[in-house]
Image (spheres, rainbow, N blue to C red):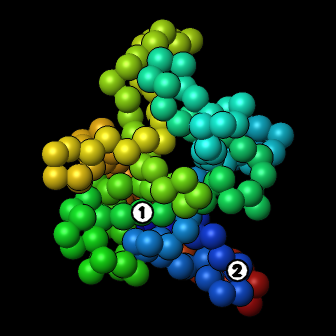
Amino acid sequence: MCQCGELISPTCSPEVCPKECKVTYGAPVQFLLATEELSDKPLYMASDSLMSTKGVQQKSGHRGVFLSADRCNYNTHWVFQHVDPQIRLEFEGQPVPVNTPVIIRHCKTNSALAIEHKKSWGLLDFEYEVSSCNHLDGHRAENDTNQICVCTNLDVCESLSDVKSDAEKLLKTMST
């Protein structure tokens, strides 16, 4: 898994989980959606119960997903799960590969992240609603609506790590 971005981070202390730590199936993670360059405070993806004021999406009526500045709040914790429920437990603790479909489940409400088929007009174009709702088929497995693919460009990440190592080598030679 590419480690140069920090938009998805494990929720453990730096002493327990070093910076090189990989995101694994079943371990709580947080999604940093707005960094301090874009906002006054870092904003994390969160969800809450249907009874809260932020709880319901406009079109679908499902549990809402919103941004929260409170990093310590349990509403910002999510876990990755394997798409196939029959082998989900076998993948517990394994690193999550990029560019493969996964289920992203909320820790508190146990509902999966979903891209709804309902769309509305946004600032620039049509936008799809994102909610936290389990869409199950006849076999009680998640539909395609709940399958999310975390994508990255490995070439960019590898070149960034090469630039970083080249810069470190240059600094070492300049300091001696």
Q: Tell me the SS state at disc 2.
A: loop
Quadrant of the rendered structure where residue 50 is?
top right
| Residue type marked 1 | Phe
Answer left or right for 40 relative to 101: right
Q: Tell me the SS state at disc 1.
A: strand
Task: Quarter of the image for the N terminus: give it.
Answer: bottom left
The local crowd at label 2, few if under 14, some if 14 to 19, many if 20 or more residues have their Cα within 10 Å, is: few
Residue 27 in sight here: yes
Vertical side of 63 occupied by 175: above or below: below
Residue 155 in sight here: no
- Residue drawn 71% across and 79% down? 13
- The disc placed on residue 14 is 2
Answer left or right for 13 relative to 47: right
The local crowd at label 1, few if under 14, some if 14 to 19, many if 20 or more residues have their Cα within 10 Å, is: many
Relative image position of residue 144 (x, y in whole percent): 24, 42
Relative image position of residue 21 (x, y in whole percent): 53, 79
Q: Earlier in the sequence, mark 2 or mark 1?
A: 2
| Foreground disc of the pair 2, 1 | 1
- Residue drawn 64% across and 54% down? 76
Relative image position of residue 101 (x, y in whole percent): 27, 54
